[in-house]
Image: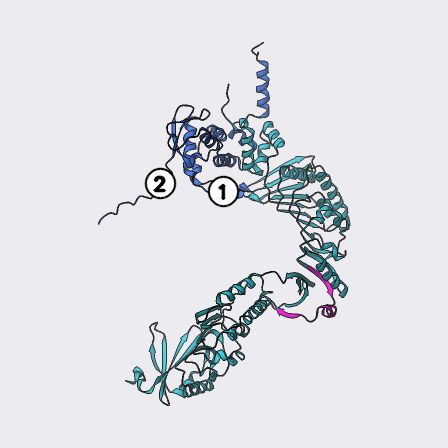
Amino acid sequence: MTCPPSLLNMPDVVMNIILKKVGVQSVQVLRKVCRDLRNFIEEHKSESYIDQATLAIDLDSVHLGFPFNSIVVKYKKHEKGCRVICQKTYNTTEKNLDNSDFLETALNDFKVIMKSQKNGVEFFNICFKLFTLDDIGDQELIAAGFREKLEKSLQSWDHPVPVRRIIIGAVNQTEVMSILRYLDPKLLENVEMSASRYVDSIPMEIDKIMETDQWKNLKTLKMSGLIVLVPLKHFSHLTTCSIFRKSLSGDELTELRNTFQHSTSLNSMEVTYQFLNKSDICNQLGLPTVTQDFLGTKIETWEVGVSPNTLRFTLVPKERGYAFIIRKIPIQKTVPSRIFLDDFKIIMKNQKSAVGNFQVHFHLFKDHDFRNEELLETKFLEMWRQSVQQWGHLIPVKELIMSTVSEQEVMSVLPYLDSEFLESIDMFDARYVESFPINTDRIIQLKQWKNLKTLKMNHLIVSCPLEQFSHFSTVSIFRTSLTGEELTELKEVFAKSTTLTSMELTYSSINKTEICDQFGQPCKTHDEMSRNIKTWETRLPHSTLQISLVRKEKNYVFRLQKYPQQEAVKCPADK
Amino acid sequence: MSVEPEVPIVQVEEVRENPVLYKIISSDNHVFTISEHAVKLSKTLWDLITNLGLTAENALDNPIPVENVNGKNMETIVQFCERHKYDEEEPEYTNYIREFVLPEWDRQLLSIDNEELFQLILATNYLDIQKLMDYCCRVIGDMAKDKTPEELRIIYGIPTDAEDDALERSASDSPGPSG
């Protein structure tokens, strides 16, 4: 007699594929369906994929969490035994297990679920929250009891716990060891530890931890709120490391530098100190470069060349202490901007005629890391300058379009452009929302500036005397306020200049009476967008100056246009 | 007002189609025609075709008998293979629960009762069609999602251990052929 096909009489290969695809959660349910299925599952240990797991141990409960489908199982101490509460996205089920210990039940379930996990769990969080306000003295005793049960359970596993990254909330070495040594050293790469029961940083010994294989194979270590006192050389096998220490003295700094110098793997280290001796640091590293992040926090940076690398030390205040960050930066290694600069040089090498329009945009702007923005920029500009200086010729460009916010940026481009070709510059501010003042002292000294014909500076407020613009033919700039003096200055510039034909000035404030005093009553018209325009006309030797004023958003646009005498356009109101 | 004639959608398959067709005969003597690209999805069939040395010229004259698969399942399989013949290889999923979603067309195709589904799985396993196997197992898996053991027992038609024991007992109690 042939049975109709059903799950139970599937070939093993098929069964294995099905079990792999139904997911860990359903496998656990299927285990309970019947003996045959359970035997099959136990025997074949079909591979499961758990990528995150949480085990939070409280005094009277354990949370076991597997974030796929957001399942949390809570094992609570109950007068008769253990109460199991399973929370899923939409429903909660509860069950009492008489005469069973909540911790043992939780650990056993954890073991069963993890049984067929072969790949490393990407993210495993274990936290000893053992915390009571009533009887503080007992706490460590209780903790010891928990630890023993945990260890007993982990010892009974037939394979090491497969975890790639573990987050341990604990307060002492014994607690950390009670889990760490059962993890698969071949898989474990990343350990994060933090003090789970105390607010203040507490010292922790790590001598036993350092002897384990797990420690030796680690790549990343993060210890927060746990102060370590061991020599720093013990961290040299890591790539990234973040630890807490007592105080940063001259000796400590030497030790730090030596650790970096002798380590081939260490890339960055963040050490949080409670105290520091500033003069010791400056004695060794010299004076720092001081910058600020967007919150105004002071950041001090030192750089020391340690062949073939540069070590960058950054000091920032952090809560009640200081974070001292050391980064290894390879000097010789080709960085993307270096490749770009070389390529650019090659492309431009044989360019003899002028490039019609050359655009430079500085987007040195990262949402998440304001701290390094300026440093990055300074470094890049430095590289750029070095590269361009080696060209042996100036960059032939007719029109420069540049988004910039500082004189430094302009000065790193403009002097390298061929002044014989450069006729026009269009600059604007692309980084800040409001118009932003820019210093032009050094720019206006440049030969390139003096040969310019057209200038446009958008949202960059200049404050240099207006006569600096008299050699242009067309100018568009932003200024702060239009006063009587400014008007006189403008008139003089137009009267004297032989080249200037039009100028557009955007002011954030104006003095209307002063304008009327100088030019008389305006005539009023509308433009195509029906904005009010006030116009004036005034005579200059051999020419007429037509002036208009329009409101534009928060600003006023003041436009001056020079016409030769005979072609003067009459204001319509005059007719 | 002239109604614009409906523009027929140019079928990509027709353009790309290499018109080599094969004939397959199911266990209940139904004959199916399948294109070369589609038949390649079945490792068993493609191995057979290469071993038999079938070519574009003689393919239709030499139908391939498949004894283990009936016409109903073969129809589903041919439909599936024709549909997916130009699919690109899918990435290896590490977490089926989260990453894998069964396409609507396939869900429709596989909306059949359990017994048929398991039969199809057996046929798929025999013909070694990786993708269809994945999809079928996925359907089985979806059935099991968020169910209690009791519900699963009903869904999969599995007797309880107690029933099982009773069945075995009655089987051993009844006189055997020799008794």
Chain letter, colour blue in render: B
- Tell me: residue B69, above or below residue A185: above
Image quadrant in which you'd find residue A412: bottom right
Measured as percent of width and height from the top left, residue A26 is found at: 56, 36
Q: Secondary structure at mark 1?
A: loop
In magenta, the rendered stretch is A270-291
Residue with the mark numbered 1: B90
- The amino acid marked with disc number 2 is Glu
- Which residue is the extreme one toward the top? B179
Image quadrant in which you'd find residue A491: bottom left
Q: Is residue A200 visible?
A: no
Marks 1, 2: nearer the viewer: 2
Chain letter, colour cyan in render: A
Q: Which of the pair A568/A336 is nearer the observer? A: A336
Q: Which of the pair A139/A380 is nearer the observer? A: A380
Identified at 45% across, 24% down, the residue is B67
Measured as percent of width and height from the top left, residue A146 is found at: 73, 43
Residue with the mark numbered 2: B14
- State whether discs 1 and 2 lie on one chain: yes
Image quadrant in which you'd find residue A261: bottom right
